[in-house]
Image: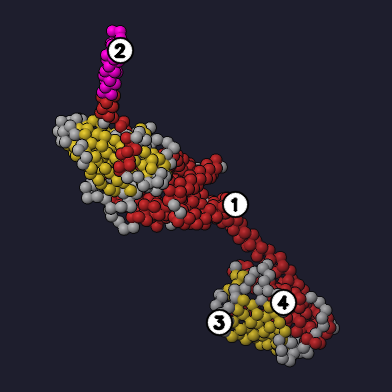
Amino acid sequence: MRADDKRLPQLSEGRRGLASGLLALVCTCALLAGAGRAAADDLGLTAGASRLPVAPGLTVYRDPGAAMTLEQARQAFRDGRFQASQRPWPSFGFTTDAVWVRFAVRDVSGAARLWLTELRSARMDELDWYLLREGGVIERLGAGNLRECSPGMVDTKVPVFPLRLAAGERAEVFLRVHTETSLHLPLQLWDAEAFIQAQSVSEAAYAMFFGYLAALILLSLMLSLFTRTRGFLIYSLSIIALFAMYFITTGYYGWLHLPGLRFAVHGGVILSAGMAETMLLVYLRDFFDLSATRPRLDRWIVRVIWCLPVSIAIFMLGPYHLMNPLLLLQAMLLGAGSLIVSLQVWWRGNPVARFYALAWLVFWALFALSTFEYLGWLPMPALPELQAMSGVLVSTTLFFLAMADRVRQMRSDMVQAQAQVLEMERQAGRSLQVQLCQHQQLIRDLHDGIGGLTANVAILAEIGRRGAVAAGERGCFERIGELASESGAEVSALMNSMDAGELLWPEFIVQCRKHGNLALAGHGIEFDLTVSGECADAGFGLFAGMSLFRVFKEMLSNVVKHSRATRVEAHFDFTRSGLRLTLQDNGCGTADTPQAGRGLSNMASRIAELGGTMTRGGGPGTAWVMELPLPMASPADHRAPVI
């Protein structure tokens, strides 16, 4: 064997030794690199820090079955299945998955301190907090809307987990979150003193928010009471619904340990949001008076309002993680529709729509932004509720200004209407003065014209009667004189009635009695007029009295012409609501009365124009019964048929 052959095993052993050394060096470097990377991923808690986001070292893992244990989560992290968070504040929208979050912390401040891990969201249903200390010690805390919080939790409206580390100590944190609400994880670490100061500022901001809403509610209720404006009442109900919704979502309902928390965090939010949507649509109808200005659109809005309770009931019965996004979508559609309606009304010249449209624009812009964040479509800010709360404050203020502007516009319209009414009254007064002057002129014309003519005819008739030789001629002149006297009396009665403006029943009865005696006595017919009851109606219109007097005269004229009667009785029977006028003679009756002429039909027409009826009565001779309501109708208003 050659010497070189003897050296081969030695060389092979040397090469194997070199390879082993290189492999050990690589492994050592890898371990050091891994340790360095692990150390680099740790969140260092320094002495001067007061608040630290955990995002730089945050990794997350989604558990679709929501059944993974802590050991399985740790194994998944070691296997590299946890993914680094792509956003400072992870948001997963509405999901049934459980989400595991892992981060590591190391105290580098040189002194033991108390740190607080805050999850800035009050709506998570189940939270499990695991703190893994060096040496295998595991501390666990539980919180959430649907479970009792562990005694070691900090008593605040959002989950806050205490984190105590010794000087230089390192620990891992695993956080499991499972909820039907929108799942987002705005995590941050606080120094205890800084947290207390921040909480005081935060509580002051929340107190201002809820106090402002409460002030708007009280002010709206007071204005609805004092101004009798229904819009303020509807507005206050919508603000009450928003108050209830934010009182639940910000965590105050659970923090105060009010009853029914399990229903409130899901069903209560849907119910209050649905009430707010309904009241805002009712407010829209009332604000723009759509029933009068746009009735077709108003009918559609009424249908939507009636459908809202059905949709809210469906949303409350279904799975929350599916129903709440539908509720948000419905709210955005209703808001967009309300905004379009207000813009159209504004475009058509209604100035009070400007605040209303601006309020909807601000509210729904911020509401849509918050909705996209809760759905996981946009990055979630550190304080997501501030956007929605700011939008509510601005929009509710603008809504209030819109209502106040509407009341101002209504008052302005009322002042203008009053001014128009006053102007119309002045015009009516001037017209009435003109009519009164014409009225007086007409009375003078009747007196000087027709009255003078009838007086001259009576004088001429008397002269003719005195100069007449034959008895028949004297009878003719006497009849002409009687007719002239009767015409003069009627003209005098007409002038007196026109001068008085209305007739009184006692005066009317006196005229009827006077005319009956005058018209029948010359023909040898006895006349008797009686009255029973008391009339509650003091007087009646001029033209109604003239029409009734014409009927009375025509009846007496028919008696003289056709009945061959020797006695006529008239009876006025007054009741609380009507007049019954009966005219009875002892003549030959209607069977022997000629039917020629239009006397009876004219009388029936006049009685019908007064709202009454005229019938044939029983008994010997002829009896006519007229029944009239009190007060009587205008002759131009034909109400009742003739029987």
- The CA distance from mark 4 to mark 1 is 45 Å
Q: Nearer the viewer, mark 1 or mark 3?
A: 1
Mark drawn on residue 296 = 1
Q: Which of marks 4 and 2 is in front?
A: 2
According to the image, label 4 marks what residue? 642
- For the residue labelled by badge 3, is the local secondary structure a helix, a strand or a loop? loop
Q: Which of marks 3 and 2 is in front?
A: 2
170 up-or-down from 494: above or below:
above
According to the image, label 2 marks what residue? 8
The magenta stretch is 1-28
Residue density around tag 3, few if under 14, some if 14–19, many if 20 or more, within 10 Å: few
- The CA distance from mark 1 to mark 2 is 104 Å
Ranked by sequence position, the earlier of labels 3 and 2 is 2
Ranked by sequence position, the earlier of labels 1 and 3 is 1
Most frequent secondary structure within the magenta stretch: helix
> Where's residue 45, x and y in %?
22, 32
320 displayed left or right of 431: left
Q: Which of marks 4 and 1 is in front?
A: 1
Q: Tell me which amino acid carries mark 1.
A: Arg
- The CA distance from mark 4 to mark 3 is 26 Å
- For the residue labelled by badge 2, is the local secondary structure a helix, a strand or a loop? helix
> Which one is in front, 410 or 292?
292
Q: Tell me which amino acid carries mark 3.
A: Glu
> Where's residue 439, x and y in %?
63, 62
Residue density around tag 2, few if under 14, some if 14–19, many if 20 or more, within 10 Å: few
According to the image, label 3 marks what residue? 534
Which residue is painted at 42% across and 54% down in the image?
271
Whether residue 315 is visible to the viewer of this picture, yes or no, is yes
Ranked by sequence position, the earlier of labels 4 and 3 is 3
- For the residue labelled by badge 4, is the local secondary structure a helix, a strand or a loop? loop
